[in-house]
Image (cartoon, coloured by chain):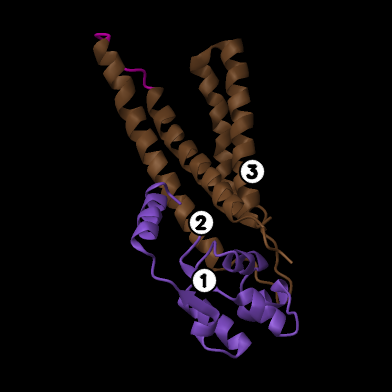
Amino acid sequence: MARTDLRNCVRRLRFDHGEMTQQQLATRVGVTRQTIIAVEARKYAPSLPLAFRLARVFRVTIEDVFQYHEPTDDQSQGSERNMLAGG
Amino acid sequence: MVPEQKRAWFVLAVFVVALAGFVGLAVAVGPKLAFAAFGLCGVYGLTPLLFRKRPRPGEVPTDERDRAIAERATAVGGMASYAAFVAACMVPWAVCALRGRRMIDVLALPYVVVAGMVVLFVARAVTVLVLYGREGNHGAD
């Protein structure tokens, strides 16, 4: 899957919260560890409920965890090419 | 490896065995009867029952990402199956018409149906493996 335009600082927040492991975070938000790995690597954009659960675990707002960057024209054309290529 | 990936590998393994059986039978008894080897793919009906594991307390067996991958793979499998089904329905009749034959072997009908189902399962399995493989485990701590 192509990288999403949704950036996040889940990894940093985990380490700021007592070096929480991916498995511990996954258990607390009710997903598999592979999903946390995919979110951190920006390979998977989580659903809104999961994004809220992640923010609540870290006791921050959702914008403190996820930042959406509007793609520029060049990037959006690249994204469209990726989508057409099935990425 | 999640259960969905194990099931995908199982589907591909059965397909490879059926294909090998087809080749072996084609040499032994001819290509027409050799298609019976694909009857082995009937075990695909059992795949939902395979590799199920009882989750330990606190463990999450599947989540929204697994469901998203499964949905996408099923959509790809459906498209591939439809394309194969339409081609299998049209091509033999077209070839027969071009050769001036007005009838087709009745055995073609079950082959068309089985081919459509096999393509569905195999395309879905490949898509599942590709989607999980792309995300990989890079970044695991």
Q: For numbered disc 2, what is the local secondary structure?
A: helix
Residue A14 place in picture, x, y as percent: 68, 79
Q: Chain of mark 1?
A: A
Q: Which chain is brown?
A: B
Identify which amino acid the numbered label 3 is placed on: Phe
Left or right relative to B81: residue A35 = right
Q: Can see residue A1? A: yes
Q: Main secondary structure of the magenta part?
A: loop
Q: Residue at x 45, y 32 (%)?
A: B115
Q: Residue at x 62, y 86 (%)?
A: A57
**Are the residues flagged by discs 2 and 3 in contact, CB closer than 8 Å?**
no
Query: Is residue A61 or residue B34 the one in the foreground?
Result: A61
**Are the residues flagged by discs 2 and 1 in contact, CB closer than 8 Å?**
no
Q: Which residue is mark 2?
A: B70
Residue range (magenta): B99-106
Q: Which residue is mark 3?
A: B10
Q: How many marks?
A: 3
Q: Can see residue B102? A: no
Distance from the alpha carbon under mark 2 to that under mark 3: 16 Å
Residue B77 place in picture, x, y as percent: 45, 45
Residue A73 place in picture, x, y as percent: 33, 60
Q: Which chain is purple?
A: A
Image mark for residue A7: 1
Residue A11 place in picture, x, y as percent: 65, 74
Q: For numbered disc 1, what is the local secondary structure?
A: strand
